[in-house]
Amino acid sequence: MSAISHHIPDHLIRAHAAGQLPHHFAVVVAAHLSMCDACRAQAEAEEMVGGALLDRLAPAALQDGARDRLLAALDSAPPPPPAPRRSGIFPAPVMQALDGQPPRWRMLGGGIRQQVLSADEDGSLRLLYIPPGRAVPEHGHNGLELTLVLQGAFSDSEGRFGVGDVELAEDDLDHQPVACPGAPCICLAATDAPLRFTAFLPRLLQPLFRI
Ligand SMILES: [Zn+2]
């Protein structure tokens, strides 16, 4: 893995370790953790702190016999289905969001493609495919957008983002990511609110493509 230079911010790693991130963001963070030793080590440290706190609470919280019943229930439960594994450029958390299938791209125009992996009132999770030299329509954000590069690279006013890099865009950033020369740029992007497109046409198409 080439050097990753843009990481998950500390507060998001902490929220992820505590299980407090909305699903869409949790998938992006989990995918980055699977690619980044530094963030994974930090997440494991956070989980150990959380586990130590739980250990202190658990004896008081569990009633007599509850622990035995819980262990018995775990023993008799059917084994969970095997989790999807990494496939090509897609880390295991992305393969899980894809139900183990290859992406089913939809054309967005200009050679740009996307697949919406999930969308609800909390936001959306999608894969984007951007040919080299192409730009994602310029947009601002109503909330938070977290983008992880899986193949190729893009650049915008914040810098260059290659494989494994994460860009966190908050509502004060208007940016226009452009895919770098080379392989098409494939990204995983989570948002917690619909994007605000500045041009008329994309705004018209937005409900159609759920971006
Ligand atoms: Zn990292």
Image (tube, rainbow, N blue to C red):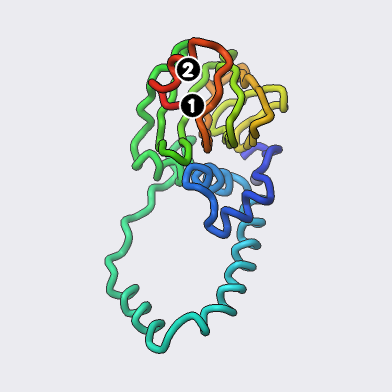
In the picture, residue 178 is in which quadrant? top right
Q: Count the labels in the image.
A: 2
Which numbered tag is attached to residue 128? 1
**Position of residue 208 measured from the top left corner of the image (x, y, whole percent):** 38, 21
| Residue contact between numbered discs 2 and 1, judged by CB atoms under 8 Å | yes
Report the front residue among 62 and 6.
62
Amino acid identity at mark 2: Ile
Counting other residues with Cα less than 10 Å from the Cα at mark 2, is it few (<14), some (14-19), or many (20 or more)? some
Q: Residue at x 59, y 63 (%)?
A: 47
Q: CA distance from mark 2 to mark 1?
A: 7 Å
Q: Secondary structure at mark 1?
A: strand
Query: Would residue 189 appear left or right of 157 to someone viewing this image?
Result: left
Q: Residue at x 52, y 38 (%)?
A: 192
**Position of residue 106 measured from the top left corner of the image (x, y, whole percent):** 38, 21
Q: Residue at x 72, y 27 (%)?
A: 158
Q: Is residue 184 above or below residue 65?
A: above
Report the front residue among 145 and 4.
145
Report the front residue among 156 and 143.
143
For marks 2 and 1, the one nearer the N-term is: 2
**Position of residue 130 measured from the top left corner of the image (x, y, whole percent):** 52, 20
**Residue under pointer 2:** 112
Q: Is residue 171 above or below residue 133?
A: below
Which numbered tag is attached to residue 1? none
